[in-house]
Image (cartoon, rainbow, N blue to C red):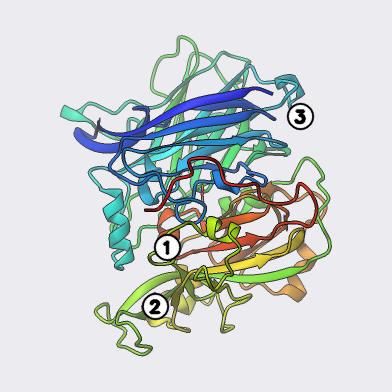
Amino acid sequence: AAVVEHTFVVSQMNMRHLCTDTLVTVVNGQLPGPVINVTEGDSVVVHVVNRSPYDITIHWHGVKQMRNCWADGVPMITQCPIRPGNNFTYQFSVDGQEGTLWWHSHVGGLRATLHGALIVRPRQGAASYPFRRPDGEIPIVLGEWWQQMDLVQLERNLAGGNFNYSPSAATLNGKLGDLHYGCSGAMEEGHVLDVDPGKTYLLRFINAVLVSEYYIKIAGHRFTVVAADGNYVNPYTTDTIAIAPGQTVDALLTADTSPGMSYYMVAMAAQPTVIVPPFPVTMTRGVVRYPSSSGAPMVPAMPGTHDTDTSFHFHGNLTGLRRSPVPTRVDERLLVTLSVGSMCRRQGQTTCARTSADTIIMVNMNNVSFQLPAGATSSLLEAHYGHSSMSAMGLATLPDRPPVAFNYTDPALVQRGPREAWLEPTTKATTARRFRYGSVVEAVFQNTAVMQTDSNPMHLHGHDMFVLAQGLGNYDQARDVARYNLVNPPVRNTVLVPSLGWTAVRFIADNPGVWFLHCHYQFHASVGMATVFIVEDGPTVGTSLTPPPANFPKCT
Ligand code: C2O
């Protein structure tokens, strides 16, 4: 096993798109940032040099960090952030995982420009892929361009109940594409993928956007999906890929259509999450180009805006390739509503007028909106490692189920909206759940109608989840367990909970530490759709959290 070493200099620079300079925070002057290529079993060392004006952390999305929660990179959950002008070196190894993972800053909206691919290849080389050996491999990062928008300020607006936001464009590997115009009518450059006829390419898609699931299509071609979130799936052939924020999809593309032509690769927001009209369709076009092609590229027919069926079927059709033994015993069961509620603006008040002056809209899980403990002097992980109790850490227990049962997917709730659909007032707290080492946890995430059209990509740090089933409507345990796939469920670190529906997962809490669980729509997470799972140390050697690294950042 090798040591893969990188230096990430985080700094601000101007980038020009749509004929306007925008100040962005990037790694090594690149957007997307550098690709980290490793072989399974390698150690990774990344020296982060913070020359930006912000507090920074880097999270290695999908890397399990077994017993090494210290390198997980979540501000105030696992570490104090790296202050401006300071450095920190992340060290971890990538064991027992193969495929496409990625890295991103975990500091609010900065993720929009601080991200890149982390690719893990098998030890025996590409010949050992459980699918036809590709002739080329191409990481494709799906991003968004937020023009002249201070993403740190945007998050503050959200916390104050102002949900007025929208990206200016989608991007493929940082390119906006020809649907967008730069100065004096010139079209923006799109991402170009040059292919040779008859060859097969492994496209490694990463959805790094802040706010929407996307559909990806290439005119005249089909994909064979072979992996998702760094876990192999049974080959699944489709013309449309559905990919939610935080997710990765590896797909084979064979250049088997008429040469001498080019074909658009289109990525389009599947469910625009913009609440305030106008609802722009966020879209980008790249080009798949055959040698000596001429003429305008062929355009694919995209699913309609607000088409949720295509997403539901894509996710429902995936099955895991390696038949991992799904535990049949369940030690802990959670039903978690992902919802929008409201609370009185004035502290201590429990009844107030349903006006924007008096009530504030809060995103929540089981009616509790997550917030970090105020004035903490260390991360929760350091407090936990020092044997603090949950209450000493300022933590409240995440309820096992919603406080009131109601018809979660009643269309009437959509009509009433979050302010009127009071249901039960939301509260704010730093919630967590503690799990004994080795517990089997089943969690059902229930999306509620007050989410309007949003689906929720739920991401668990430090663990992969067996995705047992998804459904539309209200989850009903007695009825729905019969639909669980306990034979070959897909294994993912980010599961999509369909709008007006639910998703059931199981995971084994075998990685001691303090792990964030949150919606990967940045703006859901930043206003409370999050909680913390604390996994206790195991009883035997090699089952406990290791000591913190040297030079761990301090909060003061
Ligand atoms: Cu990709 Cu908690 O993040």
Q: Which one is earlier in the sequence, the residue at label 2 or at label 3?
A: 3
Task: Please tell me which residue lies in front, 288 or 539.
Answer: 539
Label 1 and label 2: CA atoms lie apart by 26 Å
The local secondary structure at tag 3 comes to loop
Say if 461 sits above or below 380 in the image. above
Q: Is residue 196 left or right of residue 142?
A: right
Residue furthest to the top: 292
Residue at 59% over, 66% down? 501
Say if 137 sits above or below 79 in the image. above
Residue ID for mark 3: 130
The local secondary structure at tag 2 comes to strand
At label 2, the amino acid type is Ser
Residue ID for mark 2: 342
x and y percentages locating residue 461 in the rendered image: 59, 51
Residue furthest to the bottom: 351
Residue 219 seen in the current view? no
Task: Please tell me which residue lies in front, 269 or 167.
Answer: 167
Q: Nearer the viewer, mark 1 or mark 2?
A: 1
Label 2 and label 3: CA atoms lie apart by 49 Å
For residue 376, the mark is 1
Residue 157 seen in the current view? yes
At label 1, the amino acid type is Ala
Q: Which one is earlier in the sequence, the residue at label 1 or at label 2?
A: 2
10 Å neighbourhood of mark 3: few (<14), some, or many (≥20)?
A: some
Q: Nearer the viewer, mark 2 or mark 3?
A: 2
At label 3, the amino acid type is Pro
10 Å neighbourhood of mark 2: few (<14), some, or many (≥20)?
A: many
The local secondary structure at tag 1 comes to loop
